[in-house]
Image (spheres, helix red, strand yellow):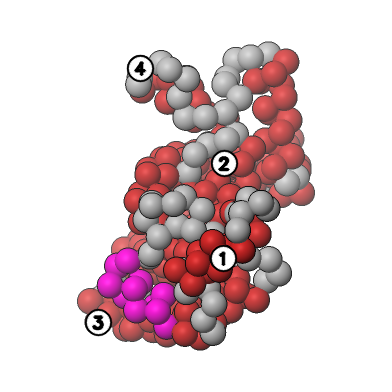
């Protein structure tokens, strides 16, 4: 297993390098530049030129890339172009806990809700329960989560103000866990809906496939009760395909966080990425892109390791 992990890390290095080159080129070739949004139109042209020169924006793109790469390899993402005097690392670190909290709670919600419903649907195939779960799943797949977010925001925060409309805590109020949970419920649920429907379908199809296996028939022939057969003999094997898609879910959570954080004004890295993209804050965009790519690689690696843990027959 250790050698497999080392091989995967070695393979990930050129992959991340390629992502950095493509991302850097696309960002710098896109129309517009930070000075057009940063500077006051009445500012002196000489000051504008001085700003461009200070951040090296007047140099060729490949020179800028190598300078950025060298800095990044030393753990330095540079300074923000928009937030003057603030490093990109400190900017991200100030937002990262909020996004991690949102992603972890959303992932737990997605798994806690979708897997039991998938199993329930699989153990009662072609019944009203199965059709109801299937219909709701397809509706969830077909409905964009930003639309769900806007509807829930309108219903539960505007028309019936049960939950706050945005932010991570009540303004000017002392910190409390309940207040944080109160603000977290709506955005976490909306972010979870992005993968809840798909996970339910995966769980259902996987469990149905397992329940058709010979060892399940043998267990039933020996007189084991239905629930024992399902949860002791079938559940563990049915979870293997579900675990493998964990690595695919992480990118959707990162992408979904950009949308959900902007809807609920949740001050995380998703909202930071959106602001940086609008303001052409190149160092922040590159740092967040590389962090997202790294998380995707780590997520896939974790999925493979979990796969081997769940199924001891698999060796790497």
Earlier-in-chain disc, 4 versus 1: 1
> Mark 2 touching mark 1, by CB under 8 A?
no
Label 2 – label 1 distance at C-alpha: 38 Å
Magenta segment range? 66-76
Earlier-in-chain disc, 1 versus 3: 3
Mark closer to the observer (2, 3): 2
Which numbered marker is on residue 174?
Answer: 4
Earlier-in-chain disc, 2 versus 1: 1
Q: In which image quadrant can residue 165 be found?
A: top right
Earlier-in-chain disc, 2 versus 3: 3
Label 3 – label 4 distance at C-alpha: 49 Å
Picture residue at 65% right of the left edge, 20% below the top: 157
Give whichever of 195, 168 is nearer the camera. Answer: 168
Which numbered marker is on residue 250?
Answer: none
Q: Which residue is disc 1 drawn over?
A: 46
Q: Which residue is disc 3 drawn over?
A: 3
Earlier-in-chain disc, 4 versus 2: 4
Residue 249 belongs to the span the image colors magenta: no
Q: Is residue 38 left or right of residue 137?
A: left
Picture residue at 69% right of the left edge, 42% below the top: 146
Please tell me how crowded label 4 is: few (under 14), some (14-19), or many (20+) other residues with Cα within 10 Å: few
Mark closer to the observer (3, 4): 4
Mark closer to the observer (4, 1): 1
Earlier-in-chain disc, 3 versus 4: 3
Which numbered marker is on residue 261?
Answer: 2
């Amino acid at each position: 297993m250790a050698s497999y992990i080392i091989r995967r890390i070695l393979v990930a290095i050129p992959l991340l390098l390629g992502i950095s080159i493509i991302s850097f080129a696309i960002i710098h070739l896109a129309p517009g530049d930070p000075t057009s949004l940063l500077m006051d139109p009445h500012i002196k042209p000489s000051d504008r030129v001085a700003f461009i020169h200070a951040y090296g924006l007047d140099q060729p793109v490949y020179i800028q890339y190598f300078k950025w790469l060298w800095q990044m390899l030393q753990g330095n993402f540079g300074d923000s172009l928009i937030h003057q005097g603030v490093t990109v690392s400190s900017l991200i670190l100030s937002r990262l806990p909020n996004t991690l909290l949102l992603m972890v709670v959303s992932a737990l919600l997605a798994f806690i809700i979708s897997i039991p419903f998938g199993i329930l649907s699989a153990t009662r195939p072609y019944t009203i329960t199965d059709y109801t779960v299937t219909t709701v799943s397809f509706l969830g797949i077909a409905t964009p989560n930003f639309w769900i977010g806007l509807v829930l925001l309108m219903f539960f925060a505007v028309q019936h103000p049960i939950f706050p409309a945005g932010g991570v805590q009540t303004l000017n109020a002392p910190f409390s866990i309940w207040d944080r949970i109160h603000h977290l419920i709506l955005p976490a649920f909306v972010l979870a809906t992005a993968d809840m429907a798909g996970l339910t379908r995966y769980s259902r199809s996987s469990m149905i496939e397992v329940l058709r296996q010979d060892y399940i028939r043998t267990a039933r022939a020996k007189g084991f009760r239905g629930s024992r057969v399902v949860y002791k003999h079938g559940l563990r094997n049915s979870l293997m395909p579900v675990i493998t898609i964990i690595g695919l879910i992480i990118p959707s959570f990162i992408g979904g966080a950009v949308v959900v954080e902007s809807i609920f004004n949740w001050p995380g890295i998703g909202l930071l990425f959106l602001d940086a993209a609008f303001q052409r804050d190149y160092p922040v965009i590159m740092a967040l892109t590389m962090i997202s790519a790294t998380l995707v690689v780590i997520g896939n690696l974790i999925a493979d390791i979990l796969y081997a843990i769940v199924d001891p027959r698999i060796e790497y």
